[in-house]
Image: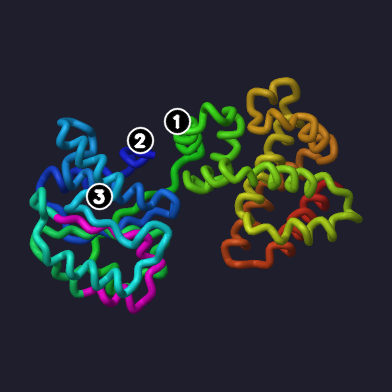
Amino acid sequence: MQTLLQQTQAYRLIKTEAEENRLSHAYLLLFNDARNLRFALKSFAKIIFSCDTGGSQEQKRRARLIDSESFSDCLCFPAADKKLTVEDAEKIKEESLLHPVESEKKVFLIADFSEANTQTQNKLLKLLEEPPKGVVFLLGASSVFPVLQTVLSRTKRLEILPFSSEQVAECLSRHYAEKYDSQTLALCAACADGIVGKAQDMLEDGYYKTLLSQAFDLALTPLFKLPVFIKTVGETKYKREFLSLLRLIFRDALFIKTQGKNAENYLLLRAEKQRLAQLSKEYSVSALLYAQEGISQAEKQVNFNAVFPQCIELLIANIREKNTK
């Protein structure tokens, strides 16, 4: 994950500002990866304390302490797996008045700020606008929308955009290569919308296997059985991941349909060649091509909170209609 972060514009920006001694007093890091948000904040804190690239024994010590959230001049809020509270805000205000112990700066890491309620956010407004000398705030948020406009106006925004599926796959390979094969890693990366934490959850929880099986069943189920099956699939909480897998299935089936023996070089689901071959026989090229467009439309509808069972029912109906023309 550290390797990916170092490639981002946000990382380079704060590193440049730290090296040129022109750090802002408060940053808001937007990173749509709740699982890795805290890690990202600590990585950025290491830049401020000049210990992001190893170096001397002292720098390595500071880096280890920041990772373990026990460095005296780098305070992390709230407690792990908790939401920021008014009590936390009061503690931050008190701690900010105390001088740094080991360095010239005192850094406060706050994740996930977007989950804090309005009262808690308001409690920190004055401190964010006029912090004590040497104090730097790094607020992390997985979404910008719940953050008050008054907070946004008092912080410098840093944003980490979704990574490419190739970048996510490489990151997964560095951490999981001994446990999962490369195809599984590539599959989860392709379905994660550029979010490493989502890919990690898919791998570790194993639910991608169930979703993949359901996606194949949906594509291959006879019309008269679809209503019952759609009702079951429609209850999944992994809506976007399900649609991503469905996209990959129709994509690979299209390659088999059009590339023949050469399709092997393009398949992401090589372990599913039998079901892919069945799918490619069942659907026309025009239907398989339309599936990509139809799934994109379904994803947009899901983003706007459309009823998921209706979305996938309409999607499959439209693909099947293209198949009859």
Q: Which of marks 3 and 2 is in front?
A: 3
Label 2, secondary structure: give it: helix
Which numbered dot is residue 174?
1
Q: Name the residue at 85% across, 39% down.
A: 282
Is 117 covered by the magenta stretch? yes
**Label 3 – label 1 distance at C-alpha:** 27 Å
Residue ID for mark 3: 70
| Residue 19 forms part of the magenta stretch | no
Is the residue under label 2 in contact with that under label 1 (CB below 8 Å)? Answer: yes
Q: Which amino acid does label 1 sit on?
A: Arg
The residue segment tinted magenta is: 106-125
Where residue 100 appears, as percent x and y from the top left, is 11, 55
Residue 236 found in image quarter: bottom right
Left or right? Give the position of 50 relative to 276: left
Name the one closer to the observer, 93 or 148.
Answer: 93
What is the distance, in whole Å, between disc 3 and disc 2 at their CAs?
Answer: 23 Å
Quadrant in the picture for the N terminus:
top left
Q: Nearer the viewer, residue 33 or 298?
A: 33
Q: Residues within 10 Å of mark 1 (few under 14, many from 20)?
A: few
Q: In the image, what residue type sits under mark 3?
A: Ser
Sequence order check: which comes first, mark 1 or mark 2? 2
